[in-house]
Amino acid sequence: MRNSLERNKASINCIHGCLAGGAIGDSLGLAFEGLSRERGKNILGYPFPNRLLFGHGMVSDDTEHACMTAISLIKSHGDPKIFEKELISQLRIWFLCLPPATGIATAKACLKSLIGITPKRIGANSAGNGPAMRAAVIGCTINNLDAIKRLIKVSSRLTHTDQRSEDGALLIALGAHWSRKNPEKDFRLFFNYLETSIKLSEDSPFRDGLKSLKDSLAEKQNTLLFAEKIGSKRGVSGFIVPTTLAALHAWLANLNNFEKTVIDCILCGGDTDTVAAIAGSLAGAYVGYDNIPKKLGKKIIDHPFSYKRLSLLAIDLEQPPSNAENQPWLGIRWILMPFRNLILVLLILLHSLRRMGPPY
């Protein structure tokens, strides 16, 4: 009985760390999104404390997608068909609340769903990084590897039908799953785990990408140098391949240092909130919530996906309630989301105006 309780606590700590780590990476990276590494450094300097609003921050679609995925997992109890239904329902409501930023493929999928097109036909032929935003929470919550693959396929193809997006999302999910099952300190063991868990097609860009990643880690290169090596000299784009590889590198290069994992992603420039959110999810799952520096999350102010409520979500993911419909977390006050989104839009506009000024 005692061993069972300890295992539950460890699992909840891992899931909570995954969600909280993603939210921290998302929040810290949001102010730097779209800036090259040089411009971000000149205007905003070091990523901590939070640069969005006087040391405080909010989260973006990265955290929202992770939370919606978690809610769908709870309500479906991991059943792929129910999970698909719940996730698209969450995405529709989220889209109607006018999020200030969303990927083109995700927006198209939501619009198609709203006009009655079936989930099997709403995904766009895109290799964007949306599926990777939803992947880590699946990997650290679900025990069975085959079940993870099925759920990743469902989650990915709802919005992105390109095989590269599914492969990238699966790699992130496997990273979170390895973090929960095998908290080893040697990054090479993660690559051994990948070899037995996934088979990439001969033409997959991840085959060469993972080799470059492993070589870079063996040479103890930092993430900035690795990003340059894979063609992201000015910043990591929203394309799934560099996003996945950069996030994995930042995490594996700093396995026991959550803060450095997130900061290294942000300093790369580009799609900083997404890359830092994905890497933060992996790092958080690896070290566990209890080992994430408390100072990094305490300044996040947001609703309804608030940082403080992520623990409730983690508990329900590890111990799904029999009647998920009645759970307080699942009764998100969607009616407040448009007003919250308006505040975020205004903050983004203020940052856009600031970016027009010196130093150049």
Image (cartoon, rainbow, N blue to C red):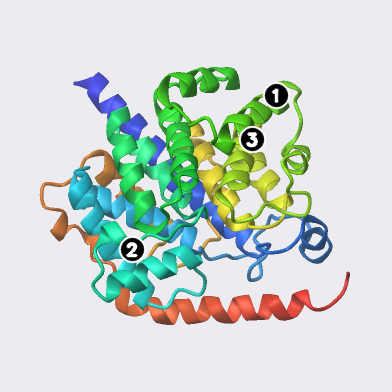
- Name the disc covering residue 122, or none: 2
Residue 324 at x, y = what percent?
16, 54
Q: Which residue is the site of mark 3?
A: 249
Query: Quick one: label 1 or label 2, which is nearer the N terminus?
Result: 2
Mark closer to the observer (2, 3):
2
Estimate how packed mark 2 is, as few (under 14), some (14 to 19) or many (20 or more) residues with alpha carbons within 10 Å: many
Query: Quick one: label 3 or label 1, which is nearer the N terminus?
Result: 1
- The residue lying toward the viewer, choosing from 246 and 57, is 246
Mark closer to the observer (1, 2):
2
- Tags 2 and 3 touching, CB below 8 Å: no
Mark closer to the observer (3, 1):
1
Residue 34 at x, y = what percent?
68, 64
Side of 140 relative to 144 (left or right): right
Side of 360 relative to 80 (left or right): right
Residue 185 at x, y = what percent?
57, 20
Q: Which residue is the site of mark 1?
A: 215
**Amino acid type, residue under disc 3 in the picture:** His
Secondary structure category for the residue under label 1: helix
Estimate how packed mark 3 is, as few (under 14), some (14 to 19) or many (20 or more) residues with alpha carbons within 10 Å: many
Query: Quick one: label 2 or label 3, which is nearer the N terminus?
Result: 2
- The residue lying toward the viewer, choosing from 350 and 227, is 227
Q: CA distance from mark 2 to mark 3?
A: 32 Å
Secondary structure category for the residue under label 2: loop
